Amino acid sequence: MHSRFLLQMLRASGVGLVLAAGLASAALADPATPVPNKGDTAWMLTSSALVLMMSIPGLALFYGGLARSKNMASILSQVFAIVAMVGIVWVVYGYSLAFTEGSHEPVPFAGRVSWLADFQWNNLVGGLDRVFLRGLTPDSTSATFSNGVVIPEYAYMVFQMTFAMITPALIIGSLAERMKFSAVFLFIFLWVTFIYFPIAHSVWYWAGPDAIADAARAVLDAPDDAAKEAAQASLDAVMANAGWANKMGALDFAGGTVVHINSGIAGFVGCLILGRRIGYPREVGPPHSVTMSMIGASLLWVGWFGFNAGSNLEATGTTALAFVNTMVATAAATLGWMFTEWGTKGKPSLLGMISGAVAGLVAVTPASGFAGPMGAVVLGFVAGAVCYFFVSYVKGWFGYDDALDVFGVHCIGGIIGALGTGILVAPYLGGVGLTDYAAKPGSASPGDYVMATQLFIQFKTVVFTLLWSGIGSAILYKIVDLLIGLRPVKQAELEGLDISDHGERAYNM
Amino acid sequence: MKIITAIIKPFKLDDVRGALTAIGAAGMTVTEVKGYGRQKGHTEIYRGAEYAVNFLPKLKIEIAVATDLVPAAIDAIATAARTGEIGDGKIFVVPLDHAVRIRTGERDAEAL
């Protein structure tokens, strides 16, 4: 801000540009105010576009191909409309609720539960500082995971926006072919507001490495005991200025919990509340285009490099690690599903391979920047086999109509990934270990890792997400049902939502 | 003159065309159709779930031949389209009253 202002003043008063540029670069060299690196900025904007491509057309085609042709336009429309709606909600209040500092007032009634005694609003949801993107300028910056490295806040905001777009779009796979467009639209609006923004804040919001380094440095520099005590208190406050799961030490690199478990359980609850499609299971037709689904799944795989490697928030070696993990875990999961299906059903299907690939992408999401590549291979293989088991057997045993297998792939794959991350981050398993920003202020040093402790933290975060999203979504479905009804009339469902909701056909041939 | 309609497995089309050409049948019309017979379709497995596929894809071929060529044409189709498996299809023969070659105006046997 300061250097920019100076530049304008100099230009206005007619001083040469050369002098102005010299002054500006002198200001840039000041270590106290880091400026974004052009490479990091370019990578984050590229990643944001890649994640958008995951939703449209990637996810839309993947889901659409799995549905019957009479509901193809319905699936495509739902994903497209959700992307557009969340984009607007995000700049109006979503970004602010998810990624700004919230109120430090205690949450009412939390004090009555001993282990929730110091639970503040900020542990659950952000504030209103960035409503309508108030105060955000091209000079605003956001912290990364490295000391002294920032990226433009606009880049951070739009990157996180693409996550908020795809997460609710994942849910519609469970609701496919039997929920009115209006009900989907209203439900998703409520869901991002009351479920996604709080979970994203709980898991991802923190003060950032520089805030921790500054506070930790003050503790070291304190001249006497009284000053040290005060500095320690302020360091504690900085460390506590984080979402509930983040403060606890939960690891979720790119959103295994926030995106996949969160949407997977919301879809599962939705398919139970909606009930089965007419004719399920025997009289529902097979996927209308495995070809479309293969195109969609492949676009998801490519886009997922933005999702996972982009989540490092800068372009470094860890970014490359996340990229490699995303590649190999997905390959392993494809084989995991393929061989399991081949062995149990006799044939390796294309639909099985692409479903396995998506399961692997889901599972490696939380682990992508933490596990080593060999750990990622194991994780992917396990996810492919276990998700196959849930989709092919468990769904049939219990008879729920999770139409496009959001629960079996995203929720189960997400849980495998979240717990697996707690294991595979171990340095002795090839992982990168934990990071301590306070021990040596200004640089990241290895943190204390105990597998059982980390696993328990991961487990608590999974349970919290399942409960918050599961119960919260059930309430929201009921509210939408009371307001406008969830299901179309029988005739409309039989005719297909393409005609009954949208008045058009996906294919006119 | 007769119309011979045969419902066959799609991948047998080239064999049937070759056999009919060999006995001197002059033309053929092919349509992609769906249907079922005594087996009432079958089931397919997608993502481990069984789906009932009631109508299976088939080809319907239609040829118009002189009456004396009918037995040879039926034999040619039946031999070429046969796999011995369920779903090989059926052959129907119906009388044909008139035929016209539109370009020349030729009638009946000359038009075939």
Image (cartoon, rainbow, N blue to C red):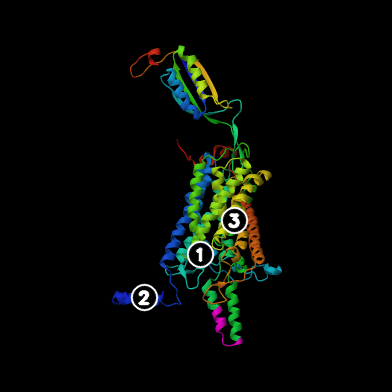
A86 vs A492: above or below? below
- As for residue A224 lying within the magenta part, the answer is yes
A51 vs A145: above or below? above
Classified by dominant secondary structure, the portion drawn in magenta counts as: helix
Circle 3: is it few (<14), some (14-19), or many (20+) Cα within 10 Å?
some
**Pick the front one: A480 or A53:** A53
Q: Chain of mark 1?
A: A
Q: Secondary structure at mark 1?
A: helix
Circle 1: is it few (<14), some (14-19), or many (20+) Cα within 10 Å?
some
Residue under pointer 3? A378
Circle 2: is it few (<14), some (14-19), or many (20+) Cα within 10 Å?
some
Quarter of the image where the N terminus of chain A is located: bottom left
Give me the residue at 49% from left, 19% from top.
B76
Residue under pointer 1? A318
Q: Earlier in the sequence, mark 2 or mark 3?
A: 2
- What amino acid does circle 2 point to? Ala
Q: Position of residue B69 (x, y in %)?
A: 46, 14
Q: Secondary structure at mark 3?
A: helix
Q: Chain of mark 2?
A: A
Q: Position of residue A443 (x, y in %)?
A: 52, 74
Mark in the foreground, 2 or 3: 3
**Pick the front one: A198 or B24:** B24
Q: Is residue B34 visible?
A: yes
Q: Position of residue A325 (x, y in %)?
A: 53, 58
- As for residue A501 lying within the magenta part, the answer is no
Mark seen at residue A24: 2
Distance from the alpha carbon under mark 2 to that under mark 3: 50 Å
